Image (cartoon, rainbow, N blue to C red):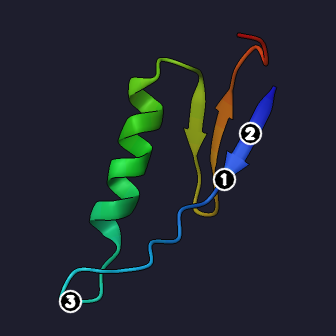
Amino acid sequence: MLVAFSVAPTSSSPDGSVHDAVAAAVQIVRDSGLPNRTTSMFTELEGSGTR
């Protein structure tokens, strides 16, 4: 199964940056151990689709 998602934080740091929120979400994906790829538009995650 392939999943692609984007992160759209509802709040930002005082300077308007959403970098920290996006970086935290990407780190969770990378820590999962599943094959993944982050592009400028989406983070793609690959898994077996079964539990």
Residue 18, by quadrant, is bottom left
Q: In this view, does 31 lie to the left or right of 42?
A: left
Q: Which residue lies furthest to the top in this view?
A: 51
Number of residues whose C-alpha sits closer than 10 Å to that of mark 1, classed few (under 14), some (14–19) or many (20 or more):
few
Q: Residue furthest front?
A: 51
Going from the N terminus, do you reach mark 3 or mark 2 first?
2
Tell me the CA gap for discs 1 and 3: 25 Å
Going from the N terminus, do you reach mark 1 or mark 3 first?
1
Residue drawn at x 40%, y 37% as measured from the top left: 28
Circles 3 and 2: CB atoms closer than 8 Å:
no
The numbered disc on residue 5 is 1
Answer above or below: position of 18 versus 35.
below
Q: Position of residue 13 (x, y in %)?
A: 22, 80
Residue drawn at x 43%, y 45% as measured from the top left: 26
The numbered disc on residue 15 is 3
Circles 2 and 1: CB atoms closer than 8 Å:
yes
Quadrant including the N terminus: top right
Tell me the CA gap for discs 2 and 1: 7 Å
Q: Is residue 46 left or right of residue 25?
A: right
| Mark 1 secondary-structure assignment | strand
According to the picture, the residue beneath numbered tag 2 turns out to be 3
Q: Where is residue 16 in the image (x, y as percent from the top left)?
A: 29, 88
| Mark 2 secondary-structure assignment | strand
Residue drawn at x 33%, y 50% as measured from the top left: 24
Q: Where is residue 4 in the image (x, y as percent from the top left)?
A: 71, 47
Residue type highlighted by circle 3: Asp
| Mark 3 secondary-structure assignment | loop
Q: Is residue 9 left or right of residue 49?
A: left
Tell me the CA gap for discs 3 and 2: 31 Å
Residue 11, by quadrant, is bottom left
Residue type highlighted by circle 2: Val
